[in-house]
Amino acid sequence: MTRTITLAALMAGTALPALAAEINIYSYRQPELIQPILDGFTAETGIETNVAYIDKGLTERLQAEGARSPADIILTVDIARLSQAKEAGVTQAVSSDVLADNIPEGLRDPEGHWFGVTYRARIVYASKERVAEGEITTYEDLADPKWQGRICTRSGTHDYTLGLVAAMIEHNGIEATEEWASGVKANLARQPEGNDRAQVKAIWAGECDISLGNTYYMGAMLQDPEQTEWADAVRIDFPGFQDGSGTHVNVSGVAMTAAAPHPEEAQQFMEYLASPEAQKIYANVVNEYPADPETPASDLVEGWGEITPDETNLQAIADNRAEALKLMDRVDFDG
C-alpha cells in the first residue's frame, strides 16, 4: 500500500501508525507517474511506501529538516537537481552491485550519491514538410546560417537548455560553445518563450521549422487530443556532437537522503528501481528510455527512431552548469 501524505504528517511521526517496514519518499514526480512502481515494490518486498509530493524546493526542504528529516528517498528529474542535492549534503553514497551492474556509468554519480532510473533525450523536432531528413545531424548544425529565422526554443536559462549547453562545453570548450550559442540565437524565429510543446505548436503553425525539445513530450502530445496535430506535424531527429558523441540525454533519478531513517529498506527500493520489471514499468509510464540498456523501451518510444546516447558522465556535465549560465547571459540569448 502507498500513502500520499502531507509533509506535516511525515514530520509528526506519531500521526502515522507504526509499520514493521516502510520508507518515506520525497517525490518531484507526480503521484500518478510513480504509483505503478510503488505498488510493484510493495508487492515484491512487503515494504510500505509513504510519499510526499514536492514540486519546488526539495533540496531546501531537506536542508531545513536536517537530521530530523523523515525522508529516506528522493525521486526527481534532471541532473541539475540531483547534483544540487549532492552538493548541499542532503544525500549519501550508496554501494550496490545491483545498481552498478544495471545503471550505466554515465547515468550515475561516480561517488554513488544518485542513480539515473530513466533518461530522456534532448532532440530536434523538425517540420515534416519543410525540413528534409538528414539536414540536421549534429547540434552544431543549428548554428548554420541556413536556419536563420527558422528555429524556436524555450529560454536559454531553463535547466533543459543549460544542460545541453553544459554538454556542449564538455565536448567543445567554452569559446566554441559561446560562438555556437550566438549562432543559434541569430537563427531564432522569435525570442525564446514557452515550454517544449509550445515550440512544436509553433512549427505546426508555421512560425518556425525546427525546435529543441525532450523526447517524452512527443508521447504527451500524442496522448492529448488537442495536441496530436502538433505532434503529427513534426518528426524527431537525434543529433549528436561533431566529435562523434551521441545524443545529449538527461535523467530522472533516485538518491538516498543523508538522514534516511530506513537505509536498508531505502536501498532495496533503489535496487528495485534498477530491476528489469521496474525499469519497463517506469519507462513506459513516463515515455522515457530505461536506464538499463538491457531493458527495451516501449513500442511508442522505439517508434521515434534509433538513439545513440552520449556516454559522457552526467556529473561532468552538471559541473559545467554554472559556466553554461554565464555563457548564455553573455550572449544575451533571451534578449
Image: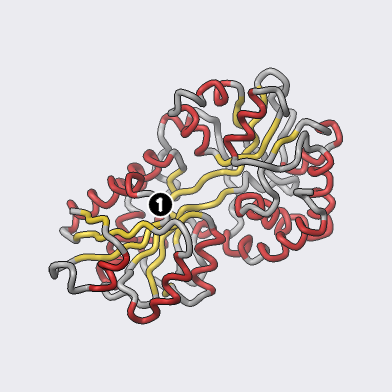
Quarter of the image where one finds residue 32: top left
Residue located 29% across and 61% down the image: 6
Mark 1 surroundings: few (<14), some (14-19) or many (≥20) residues within 10 A: some
In this view, the residue farthest toward the bottom is 67
What is the x, y in percent for residue 31? 33, 49
Whether residue 247 is visible here, answered yes or no, is yes
Residue located 13% across and 70% down the image: 18
Q: In this view, does 238 lie above or below 107?
A: above
Residue located 83% across and 44% down the image: 183
Whether residue 101 is visible here, answered yes or no, is no
Residue 170 placement, left or right of 19: right
Q: Provide the residue designation for mark 1.
A: 29
Q: Front-most of 180 and 55?
A: 55
In this view, the residue farthest toward the top is 129
Residue 94 placement, left or right of 250: left
Query: SS for tag 1?
Result: loop
Q: Front-most of 254 and 10?
A: 10
Q: Is residue 280 above or below residue 268?
A: above
